[in-house]
Image (tube, grey):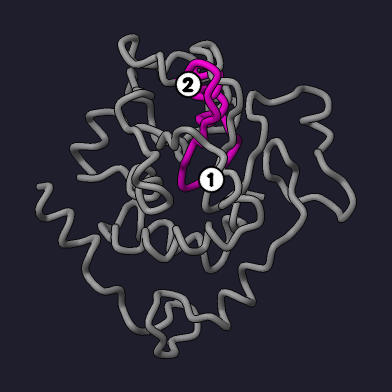
Amino acid sequence: MFTSLISRVLRPPASQCRVCHSWPAQPVCNPCVAEFAQPQPRCSRCALPLPVGRAQCGACLKQTPPLDLCLAAVGYAFPWAHLMADFKFHDQPALVRFFADLLKATPWVEPSIDAADLLLPMPLSRQRLQVRGYNQALLLAQQLSARKTRADVLLRIADTPAQHTLKRTQRLTGLDHSFAVDPLKTSPLQGARVVLVDDVMTTGASLYAAARVLRAAGVAHITGVVIARTE
């Protein structure tokens, strides 16, 4: 399975732009990226879009999330939602290179990675990993910084329904006991700066649950980095 995954990641991407159908050398051509991935003001704690001049949304001012910083490249809308589905559900891991480049072009992402001690991908349950064959968050973290990525520290200890199938209230409460830190690998977390990497952020429940576990293990600063944020 590992050899098959490597070949899928290294396979050259389709040469036709998936948005305008021109023929660049990447999944989305530069003009379409420029049109659909314009940076926009976002809440520094949850990455929701904000009016110019505001740093945090009202919900985060009222109740501070466990993330110190949260960064998203794009909104979860056309054309990104379709590409994310291909990357995540339709066996197209080679898209990771394009998405990593998109993230690196997002303000404050590269400085956050440079300042981090560790990049921790959001883990999948064993059952879901067996079905999908790869963890898209792990592939993304490795593309962002293979040297800093650790996939053996933050663990998924409960298999919960896919978040996109749940109502908001279920998402917010259903992950409280789904993550853990390997008790034999807590020493690198003491006082560390960590970047949590995921593909999509909807309510933030998964990232927040993982962040609370990491905070309890001694992590000093946590940045959430995602490709797409629902709006």
Q: Residue at x 45, y 38 (%)?
A: 165
Determine the image quadrant of residue 31: bottom right
Q: Is residue 146 above or below residue 9?
A: above
Judging depth in this view, the residue of 59 and 109 nearest the camera is: 109
Residue 129 image point, x, y percent: 24, 37
Q: Residue at x 35, y 63 (%)?
A: 95
Determine the image quadrant of residue 65: top right
10 Å crowding of disc 1: few (<14), some (14-19), many (20+): few
Q: Secondary structure at mark 1?
A: helix
Residue designated by label 1: 114
Q: CA distance from mark 2 to mark 1?
A: 29 Å
Magenta stretch in the rendered image: 189-214
Judging depth in this view, the residue of 49 and 168 nearest the camera is: 49
Q: Is residue 118 above or below residue 15?
A: above
Residue 63 highlighted magenta (yes or no): no
Report whether 60 appears left or right of 131.
right
Residue designated by label 2: 175
Q: Earlier in the sequence, mark 2 or mark 1?
A: 1
Q: Amino acid at mark 1?
A: Asp
